[in-house]
Amino acid sequence: MRINLMIEGQEDVTWPQWVALAQAAEAAGLEGLFRSDHYGSVQGRAERGSLDAWTTLAALGALTERIRLGTMVSPTSFRHPSILARSVVTVDHVTAGRVELGMGAGWNQAEHERFGFPFHDLATRFEVLEEQVEIVTRQLAGERFDHDGRHYTLRGGEARPPAVQQPSIPLIIGGLAGPRSAALAARYADEYNTVFPTLEEVGVRRQRIDRAAEAAGRAPLRFSIMTGCLIGADQGEVEERAARLKQRSAAPGDLRAWLEGLRAAWVIGTVEQAAQQLAQLAEAGVDRVMLQHQLHDDLDMVALLGQLG
């Protein structure tokens, strides 16, 4: 099981914390560091801020040597597809080929309104996602397009500079494995990522993605999950971290009841217990995990994640 660190940057992660987290991920032997792509807190905390996702990844790329870097996921409403594609290629060059791109339709209406991004109905957002996925993937593969203000005309021709990774930079599509997102991923993506699934849901969603790939005449896509994690060297350490996270997220109710409510989908426990949970996920069809670490100043837990592989 390949293990990646996932950081929710919009919850006030500072630049020194980003540097420390990336260095800790490399030292722990993790496969990569992924980050959310938001400009404001998704927990409704207006006092929290976020550094830009792709600017952050470019800077971290120059400071790291081995870990892969990417977004989970970049909303199509935040950037023109040409800007997104060029940003990704830039990070690909900075990292000598260690970048991955996650794309999604966007979901947080309050964030869009606060920062002036258009927020359409779900059907329209998905239409935009389908269009931009094609544009970005074709650009990353070395093609170009002309834009007249409303329509994209895809044309042949080699884009400059080309990506370091060939034939293209890996693309991840995220969702709940519904028919439309499964078909989109089967057409364009290298990987499908689903969020906070239970063990039972993993098997169901994996089957949907496999069927979509088969219908598209492709080999099965890589299948990954993003989920929360709370890990400790012993049970006392797990509960201590849980108490800090509960306080940070301002979750109501009793600590133990709150923690039990997370266990269906999160990876929680000692290193040994967490390793068993990951083994069950692998048996159910998960190829790799992005483990969400919300205690950004806790580098000891990052080191523990390195013991899970």
Image: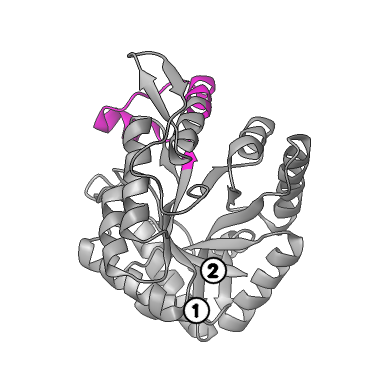
Residue at 29%, 72% (x, y): give it. 20
The number of callouts visible is 2
Picture coordinates of residue 169, whole percent (x, y): 48, 49
Q: Earlier in the sequence, mark 1 or mark 2?
A: 2
Q: Is residue 166 left or right of residue 206?
A: left
Q: Residue 186, located in which quarter of the rendered image? A: top right
Kindly identify the amino acid type of the residue bearing the numbered disc 1: Gly
Q: Nearer the viewer, residue 81 or 276?
A: 81
Name the residue at 65% across, 61% down: 287
- Place residue 97 in its image quadrant: bottom left
Viewer-nearest residue: 107 or 77: 77
| CB within 8 Å, label 1 to label 2 | yes
Horizontally, residue 66 falls left or right of residue 189, namely left
Q: Which mark is residue 67?
A: none
Which region of the structure is painted magenta? 103-130
Which of 251 and 298 lies nearest the eye of the viewer?
Answer: 298
Depth check: 116 or 77 in front? 77
Left or right position of 267 against 93: right
Label 1: state its secondary structure.
loop
Q: Is residue 283 above or below residue 135?
A: below
Residue under pointer 1? 306
Please name the residue that numbered disc 2 is placed on. Answer: 3
| Residue 88 shown in magenta | no
Residue 188 occupies which quadrant of the picture? Answer: top right
Q: Is residue 280 visible?
A: yes
Q: Which amino acid, by three-letter code, is at mark 2?
A: Ile
Quadrant showing the N terminus: bottom right
Q: Work out which residue is located at the far bottom of the displayed protein and give it.
A: 234
